[in-house]
Amino acid sequence: MNLLKGKVALVTGANRGIGRAIALGMAKEGADIAFTDLAIDDNTKSLEAELAALGIKGKGYASNAASYEETGKVVQEIVAEFGTVDILVNNAGITKDTLLMRMTEEQWDAEINVNLKTVFNFTKVVQMVMLKAKSGSIINISSVVGVAGNAGQANYSASKAGIIGFTKSIAKEVGSRNIRCNALAPGFIITEMTGKLPDDVREAWIKAIPLRRGGTPEDVANACIFLGSDLSSYISGQVINVCGAMQT
């Protein structure tokens, strides 16, 4: 199938993990892929090679997504190279988990700047391209922690909950111009980050999931493909949990 043939997708934070799976998944459905991360490294080059092997146009860009100025510059470069942006996936994010009593101001600010402000930056800049085209799909990666909260993650939860409120507001702002905005809330996804957890902690998480397994980055990518495609043309302002019924 070529659900995204003829479309250009921009994915932030795509050098590894969920972002990389989203870029590859969308490319397999025919989309040209522009992706960003903090720096151009070996992961960037290998992803570019994988994208090229799929027969689509793919290019990585170094950008600090938390900087509004840098965001404006990189989107300008992407539009000059690709012509437009049809799908924006705001995926860039970090975690600095600790209990509030131990949390530093730096740990709080870092989460808000990287997880929430990046969504503001890219959505604000890219929406201008979409408004001119009178078409577009914006997909923001939140978390089930943003839906339900989690002890030891007050900063992460706040940033991801903020993404949900932002998503619902933007959907109402730009809907009249045929632009959709939705959020995905992944649960326990098996990535490099969760792979570092002790076995007993990982097993406890999985036992708490009704489907009895952790999700894969490809599970999240498949939901992104759906929201980026015309199959979801009447879906906007929604939060879709990708969590195996961990949060209902």
Image (tube, rainbow, N blue to C red):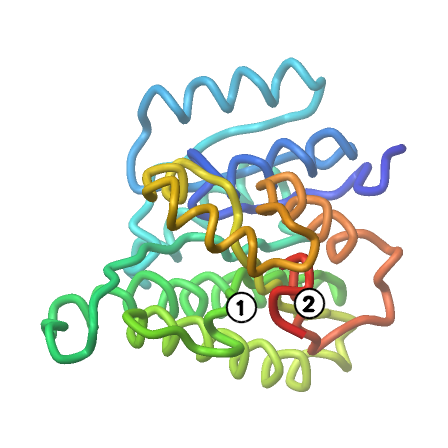
x, y percent for residue 121? 41, 66
How many numbered marks, from 0 up? 2
**Residue ID for mark 2:** 240
Identity, as a three-letter code, of the amino acid under mark 2 = Ile
Query: In the rendered view, would you say 27 is above or below 150?
Result: above
Q: Earlier in the sequence, mark 1 or mark 2?
A: 1
Residue at the (30%, 42%) spot, across then down = 38
Quadrant in the picture for the N terminus: top right
x, y percent for residue 7? 74, 43
Quadrant in the picture for the C terminus: bottom right
What is the secondary structure assignment of the residue under circle 2? Answer: strand
**Residue ID for mark 1:** 144
Residue at the (34%, 44%) spot, across then down = 197
x, y percent for residue 231? 88, 56
Residue 103 visible, this orientation: yes
Of residue 179 and residue 95, the one placed in the foreground of this image is: 95
Number of residues whose C-alpha sits closer than 10 Å to that of mark 2, classed few (under 14), some (14–19) or many (20 or more): some
Residue 117 position by quadrant: bottom left
Residue at the (46%, 61%) spot, across then down = 122
Residue at the (51%, 65%) spot, across then down = 143
Of residue 43 and residue 10, the one placed in the foreground of this image is: 43
| Numbered disc in front, either 1 or 2 | 1
Identity, as a three-letter code, of the amino acid under mark 1 = Val
Query: In the rendered view, would you say 59 is above or below 22?
Result: above
Of residue 161 and residue 188, the one placed in the foreground of this image is: 188
Of residue 163 and residue 60, the one placed in the foreground of this image is: 163
Left or right, 212 with reference to 99:
right
Query: In the rendered view, would you say 225 is above or below 45?
Result: below
What is the secondary structure assignment of the residue under circle 1? Answer: helix
